Image (cartoon, grey):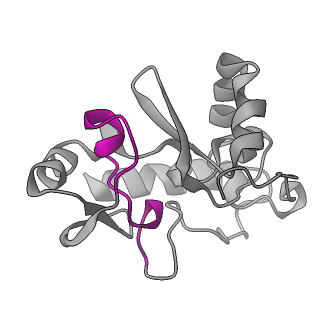
Amino acid sequence: MLRAVLFSFAVCLSMLPGAAAAQPDNPVVYTDREGQAIRGYDPVAYFAAGEPVPGNPAYSFDWQGAKWLFASVQNRDTFAGNPDRYAPQFGGYCAYAVSQGHVLDSNPKVWSVTDGKLYLFLGKDAQAKWSQDIRASIARAVNNWPSALVDEGRRKAIADSGGDR
């Protein structure tokens, strides 16, 4: 299954203008220096507990080149059974940044769940801009993903007041 996902991603990238020679500068899943997705937070907890909960390295699962941590064995097993259901959209990069055509890191404490999907944001300002028109923001981000990973010309910083960063 993972091979099929990676093959599909490679096919999508190859269809982008100028992508034949380009290689992604960013991994498909945003990770911290330790290779942990969501900076070590438990992705299932956003749904089960309704809040971000730090994961425990004793309960980890490797998926899409990242180490995912969980607060419990049950959450790890739930994720392992259906990672696409619980993983944040757009590889855990800031959803607002992706809607603008580039990728930036995200803060796992600034998040939302819309229609059963988890979205992470750089900070409160990015989340507020995203929330002005959530449906349009989602549509723009879906349209920009995964090309935002490789499009150097569109990558730029988003001003953010810090919020919960």
Give the vertical position of 43 relative to 64 (above or below): above
Residue located at (41% from left, 71% from top) = 36
Question: Residue 38 is drawn in which quadrant?
Answer: bottom left
Q: Which residues are magenta?
A: 35-53
Question: Residue 106 is drawn in which quadrant?
Answer: bottom right
Left or right of 52, for residue 28? right
Q: In terms of depth relative to the viewer, which is nearer, 145 or 87?
A: 87
Q: Residue 39, position in %: x, y?
A: 46, 66
Give the position of the C terminus as an image quadrant: bottom right
Count of numbered tags: 0
Q: In terms of depth relative to the viewer, which is nearer, 139 or 74?
A: 74
**Residue 7 lies in the magenta-colored region:** no
Q: Residue 33, position in %: x, y?
A: 51, 82
Residue located at (89% from left, 59% from top) = 153
**Residue 41 lies in the magenta-colored region:** yes
Secondary structure character of the magenta stretch overall: loop
Q: Residue 100, position in %: x, y?
A: 80, 41
Question: Residue 24 is drawn in which quadrant?
Answer: bottom right
Q: Residue 134, position in %: x, y?
A: 66, 21
